[in-house]
Image (cartoon, grey):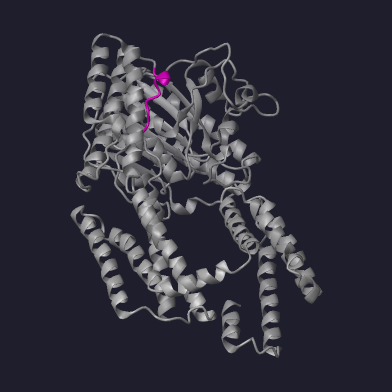
Amino acid sequence: PVFILAGLLVHCVFLASIFDIYFTSPLVHGMTPQQAPLPPPARRLVLFVADGLRADALFELDSSGAPRAPFLRSILENNGSWGISHTRVPTESRPGHVALIAGFYEDVSAVAKGWKENPVQFDSVFNESKYTWSWGSPDILPMFAKGASGDHVYTFCYTAESEDFGAQDAAKLDSWVFDHVKGFFTSSRNNQTLYSALNEEKVVLFLHLLGIDTNGHAHRPNSREYKENIKKVDEGVKEIASMLENFYGNDGKTAFILTSDHGMTDWGSHGAGHPSETLTPLIAWGAGVNYPQRVASQFFEDSFLKEWKLENLKRLDVNQADIAPLMASLIGVPFPLNSVGTLPLEYLNSSAHFKAESMFTNTVQILEQFKVKMTQKKETTLSFLFTPFKPLSDSEQINFLKKTRLYIQREKYDEAVSLCKTLINLALEGLSYYHTYDRLFLGLSIAMGFMGWTAYVILVIVKTHTNLAKAAQSHGKESTILLYSFAFVGTIIAFFLLIQTCPWTYYIYCLLPVLVWYAVVKELHVIQNVAANLSSLPVGQSVGFLSVCALGIEILVFSFFYRSTLAIGLLVLAGWPVITQLYVQAKTTTLIWILLCVLLAIFPLMPVVGREPNIPLVTAAGLLTLLISCSSLASLCKSKNKCVNNEDLKVHLYQV
């Protein structure tokens, strides 16, 4: 019981270490907001996010050669700029919206919250705006209002019960949004306070359109419902754009952006990294946005341009987080403090001076995060152990910034932009460097602990089931010296962790290897006997055994990346009775074993996610497993084999 309890505790530590090593929040706080000094081109921004909209579903032509979204097609051909926004895993709604509006990718520490909310507060374009009004899903809107400072982010949501994946027409969710936006602006004419607020600068209007995503889950992206929903969104966007232009007297100060948080697979799922999930549309038009750029040819690795008949319109691809600085630049608000996006200058229709100043602001904003991250790590590391990010030392930062500012003053804007992009790339590399600074150290500690525990388990098995442990025990003096030696090592480790003010979990990760390796070294006489016994075996047999073990481990590792490798391992297992001559002793059992292994080998070759659930198959498999197990248990109970003891029967029963 003590050994089992120790094993549970050790494995709990190993599991918890994953969160400290890989799932820590990359966000830092304490930066100063950065805003471009020149007046922005737009007074207000309208952001349409069509949840679950694939790029190909919007841009491709239908079977008759007509665009699926006529209004948006006319915009990208005559009035605005377009491209593909590349999202990142996990392709879920909340992470996608955070990337769009706050400018950073998934905070992996959100795994502890089931990916449903950000565990760390963050800044966003909405927070930096003067006023933001938003309409849509109760799953998305509240998190941006919750993190906003002050009372200037307003949300209008339908009920959670409205989000019915089994509904015949989920497009009504989008109709709800469009209708409420129209009603809101109509009512504002009778509300002077609201009317005045809507006419302020730095205003954001956010329309979250969930219908496409809901229809995609319920009916699949190739369904009539999904495609019809795209048409309804296109019509709704056209109506809202026209209504806003009329409301503001066609002042030419409204910028529009339409994009999506993620795509969707052909079978209606999302979350992974398939191109159908990561490629989303981006269309921008209005104040401050470039007009379509005609080109003779352009090169992309994919063949989408030809499929979509857009070969002669310049495609401007961005990373999803780049949209946040684009929005901030258009309406002149500070860049979100935690944004890691790079301003896509080709979308801007403004002076070279404005572009250079905006890019410089973007650079300083990202550099601020780098400085805070570096300072935090420096404060918790001994000076002689601290290794700075050499490509971006303090002097290098100052030189870069001085040189960029000089280029701008001398109106060498292209050179300034080029230098800014270099500095942004270095700062992002530095952010990653400091975020993963302790990863190697913690990873080695856990690896040492894991190897030590594995060695100890092997020794326990050897002591329990063999005669190799029968040898003279260590002398009391040797045991005392060993104990003091490991205690000294543990004290030194704890002291170093203490003066670096490390979290308490670090003590567990670093001291666990000391404990388990002490338990291993205590059994040195057993290790010596095992080594002597192994050395007496034929070299070929030992090498063969180790090679098979190594191959099995490699197949398991490869299966994380290529599932089909599991089929190879199962086929090898199918041939095991034949190789070991067990076939001669039990032909029937061997044939059943081979058949079942071959059947199981088919499973890793099948698609990861099927189009339809097959509950009867899963239920039948569970019942069959139970039946075979019970039959085996009954067979063991009737067996007259003395090797089968009560303990084995208990274990088998527990497994069933």
Look at 54% across and 79% down and name the residue there: 466
- Looking at the rendering, the stretch of residues picked out in magenta corresponds to 340-348
Q: Can you see residue 157?
A: yes
* Number of marks drawn: 0
Q: Quadrant of the N terminus?
A: bottom left
Q: Which quadrant of the figure has residue 28? A: top left
Residue 595 picture location, percent across and down: 77, 65
* Residue closer to the observer: 500 or 549: 549
Q: Residue at x 19, y 44 (%)?
A: 383
Residue 109 in the figure: left or right of residue 466: left
Return the x and y of residue 296 as percentages of the image width and height.
58, 11
- Quarter occupied by residue 537: bottom right
Q: Is residue 334 visible?
A: no
| In this rendering, position of residue 633 left or right of residue 451 | right
Q: Quadrant of the C terminus?
A: bottom right
Image height check: is 648 above or below 333?
below
* 328 to 595, vertically: above or below: above
Camera-side residue of 88 and 496 = 496
Q: Residue at x 37, y 66 (%)?
A: 517
Coordinates of residue 400 in the picture (x, y in percent): 26, 22
Residue nearer the viewer, 630 or 244 = 630
Q: Where does the image place residue 469, in percent across and percent down from the top left?
A: 48, 79
Q: Is residue 344 magenta?
A: yes
Instruction: Let me know if residue 395 is in the magenta part.
Output: no
> Is 29 situated above or below 165?
above
> What secondary structure predominates along the stretch shown in magenta?
loop
